[in-house]
Image (tube, helix red, strand yellow):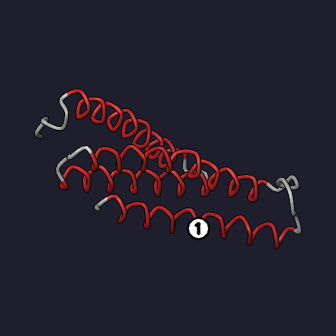
């Protein structure tokens, strides 16, 4: 299954973001919340945003694959998701608004596209050929 590649890569991204939070918590001696440290607050939100968007996107990608979408389409959408989430994480953690916005735009448009494609494949019982 092609989706498993993107699930694994995105899990590594989430782990990296989680480790960044842990590192800053230790550095600033904060066990809960952000302790008023802006750098920690950004790391927490970067991780949380990934955890909020990645699961639903992967679920939609997987259902699209299970509904018979061409593998090339799954790979294009998977790479797009990965790029969008990396751009967003880089932009949020570095306060680069351009990367953050582009990453979020990619993610939102991808979610909408995945939803529409899943509905289309369901409506046409897998007979939609792209």
Between 16 and 129, which is closer to the camera in this rendering?
129
The C terminus lies in quadrant: top left
> Can you say whether 45 is above or below 114 in the image?
below
Q: Position of residue 89 (x, y in %)?
A: 54, 55
Label 1 packing within 10 angstroms: few (<14), some (14-19), many (20+) = few
Between 71 and 50, which is closer to the camera in this rendering?
71
Q: Which residue is mark 1?
A: 15
Between 114 and 124, which is closer to the camera in this rendering?
124
Q: Secondary structure at mark 1?
A: helix
> Can you say whether 30 is above or below 125 in the image?
below
> Can you say whether 15 is above or below 70 in the image?
below
Horizontally, residue 114 falls left or right of residue 56, namely left
> Can you say whether 81 is above or below 13 in the image?
above
- Residue drawn at x 28%, y 61% is 2
Q: Which image quadrant for residue 82?
A: bottom left
- Residue drawn at x 20%, y 46% is 69
Q: Position of residue 98 (x, y in %)?
A: 48, 45
Q: Position of residue 93 (x, y in %)?
A: 61, 56
Q: Which image quadrant for residue 1?
A: bottom left
Horizontally, residue 10 falls left or right of residue 74, namely right
Horizontally, residue 129 falls left or right of residue 122, namely left
């Amino acid at each position: 299954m092609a989706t498993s590649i993107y699930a694994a890569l995105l899990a590594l991204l989430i782990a990296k973001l989680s480790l960044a939070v842990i590192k800053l918590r230790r550095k600033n001696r904060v066990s809960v919340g952000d302790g008023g440290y802006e750098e920690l607050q950004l790391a927490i939100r970067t991780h949380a945003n990934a955890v909020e968007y990645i699961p639903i996107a992967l679920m939609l990608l997987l259902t699209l694959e299970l509904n018979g979408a061409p593998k090339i389409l799954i790979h294009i959408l998977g790479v797009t998701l990965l790029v969008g989430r990396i751009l967003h994480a880089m932009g949020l953690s570095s306060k680069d608004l351009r990367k953050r916005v582009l990453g979020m735009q990619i993610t939102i448009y991808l979610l909408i596209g995945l939803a529409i494609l899943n509905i289309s494949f369901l409506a046409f019982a897998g007979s939609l050929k792209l």
